[in-house]
Image (spheres, rainbow, N blue to C red):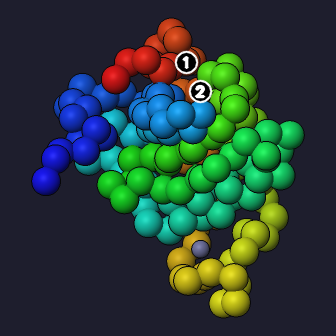
Amino acid sequence: MKRIASFCVDHTTLMPGLYLSRQDGDVLTWDVRMKQPNRGQYLSPAAAHTLEHLFATYARNSKWSEHVVYVGPMGCLTGFYLLTSGLDKMQVLELVRESFAWMAAYDGPIPGASEKECGNYLMMDPIAARREAGEMLQVLNALGTEHPFTGEY
Ligand SMILES: [Zn+2]
């Protein structure tokens, strides 16, 4: 089998940032990389799950909602995938920044966290999720200077 494109990225040198990972026609795959790979610091499964519910909820309720194809956590627990269509990179940056600012301040019930709506609704950690979102917001606010913003793969 062929090695897929995302495995061809050198994960030993990746910094937290926002990366354009793939382009398939109009659909852009973004890596919202929150943690430096293989350095011992990862999202906890519960924090990643909580952020998944919040990020997807915000993105799909934002003014860009029609352009959000998919939001989901990386299995390696270092960030999120965001698939968009019909947005340019500055619009994606605005969407991601708004999402993380909202998540960093969010203090309400986690959307979709019920037995009927979710496959593991008790695995939530809103406190860790808020902290992680706040840390990533700082990264997003320093994009292009201290942290990479797209085109770095
Ligand atoms: Zn869930």
Count up the numbered dots. Answer: 2
In front: 121, or 22?
22
Above or below residue 153? Residue 7 is: below
Above or below residue 124? Residue 12 is: above
Residue plotted at (50% across, 19% down) = 149
Residue plotted at (41% across, 53% down) = 74
In the image, farthest residue toward the bottom? 115
Q: CA distance from mark 2 to mark 1?
A: 5 Å
Question: Can the viewer see residue 83?
Answer: yes
Quarter of image, ligand 1? bottom right
Q: Which residue is mark 2?
A: 140
Q: Is residue 53 left or right of residue 30?
A: right
Label 2: how many Cα within 10 Å (few below 14, some 14–19, many 20+): many
In front: 2, or 73?
2
In the image, farthest residue toward the top? 145
In front: 6, or 147?
6
In the image, farthest residue toward the front? 25
The C terminus lies in quadrant: top left
Q: Which residue is mark 1?
A: 143
Given contact means CB atoms under 8 Å apart, are the residues at marks 2 and 1 in contact? yes
Q: Quadrant of residue 22?
A: top left
- What percent of the width, then of the height, locates residue 111? 75, 69
- What percent of the width, then of the height, locates residue 84? 63, 40
Secondary structure at badge 2 equals: helix
Secondary structure at badge 1 equals: loop
Q: Quadrant of residue 10?
A: top left
Label 1: how many Cα within 10 Å (few below 14, some 14–19, many 20+): some
Q: Is residue 60 left or right of residue 136?
A: right
- What percent of the width, then of the height, locates residue 105? 76, 47
